[in-house]
Amino acid sequence: MESTVTGRKNGDQPPVVQYDGVVKRFGSLTVLNGVSARVNKGEVVCLIGPSGSGKSTLLRCTNALEIADGGRVVFEGQPLPKTEAELRHVRRRMGMVFQNFELFPHMTALENVAVGPITILGADPAEARAKAQALLEKVGLGAKGGNHPSALSGGQQQRVAIARALAMDPDVMLFDEPTSALDPETIGEVLNVMKRLAEEGMTMVVVTHEMSFARRVANWILVFDEGRVIEEGPPAQIFDAPTHARTQSFLSHLGWNG
């Protein structure tokens, strides 16, 4: 529909990611029921809605960690490929940060960040380590490169995970509730890193329950309920003047008052 294009950042250009009627089922349960949406270059698109409404499943369909049962996902003008070898190439261009940090426990923070470029991209080890150090400094952990994950707080581990994803020079960053496993005092440090990435123009798709972050940082909001996008628009519309009763109920339940 027209409102999903006009008035959006880079809305006059082809989208980086496009979802065309995406369907995903797990057995008899339909988790995504015909989701269509787009993500433009340089946009931060936040996916919000109740738990179990399909947000994380759509994110995982974006890089084919889950394979859609219907519809299609288009990345940079091309439908996602079918073969595992081709999918690996696509996944290299989509950095993904999970709820749990999934760092290698036997590696230091710097080694965790450098390992992908060395083993997957064939980067020179010395150059990869130098880049890893620069990325750790970018996320505020320049002095922690020699620490193993067990010696880092949850917020620090998640920032290492973000640096690790950035080390692959992705075109898009996917965040699946990146603060949900964190203590309240460490959530802010992760969100601040994400905010800086947004300010630098990184294209980001973020599943989040942090409504203040979505309100301040997102360019576009998709509201999910029962496997569908029930409402979408800029943050001011969604948070200040939602039109769908389910959106109003969801935000009210969270105590959102703008």
Image (cartoon, grey):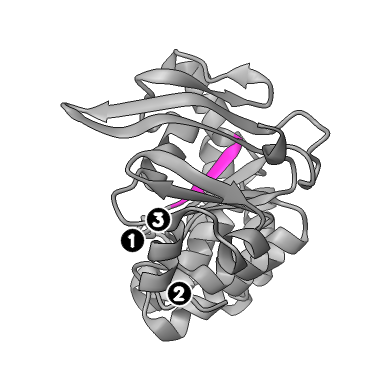
Q: Main secondary structure of the magenta part?
A: strand
Q: Which mark is residue 155?
A: 2
Residue 60: image x %, image y %? 41, 38
Q: Label 1 sits on what residue type? A: Pro
Give the numbered dot on residue 246.
Answer: 3
Nearest to viewer (mark 3 / mark 1):
3
The three-letter amino acid code for the residue at tag 3 is: Arg
Picture layout, residue 223 above or below residue 31: below
Mark 2 burial class by Cα count in 10 Å: few <14, some 14-19, many 20+: many
Q: Residues within 10 Å of mark 3 (few under 14, many from 20)?
A: some
Q: CA distance from mark 3 to mark 1?
A: 42 Å
Q: Answer above or below: position of 211 versus 176.
A: below
Does residue 167 appear in the picture of this structure?
A: yes
Establish if 134 lies above or below 126.
below
Q: As shown in the figure, which amino acid type bears the numbered disc 2?
A: Gly
Point out the tag, 3 or 1, that comes first from the N-terminus: 1
Q: Secondary structure at mark 2?
A: helix
Q: Are marks 3 and 1 in contact (CB under 8 Å)?
A: no
Measured as percent of width and height from the top left, residue 204 is found at: 62, 50
Viewer-proximal residue, 183 or 27? 27
SS under mark 1: loop
Of tags 3 and 2, the one toward the viewer is 3
**Looking at the image, do the residues carrying marks 2 and 1 touch, with CB atoms under 8 Å apart?**
no
Say the numbered circle drawn on residue 105. Answer: 1
In the image: residue 190, left or right of residue 224: right
Q: Residue at x 70, y 40 (%)?
A: 3
The residues colored magenta run: 93-97
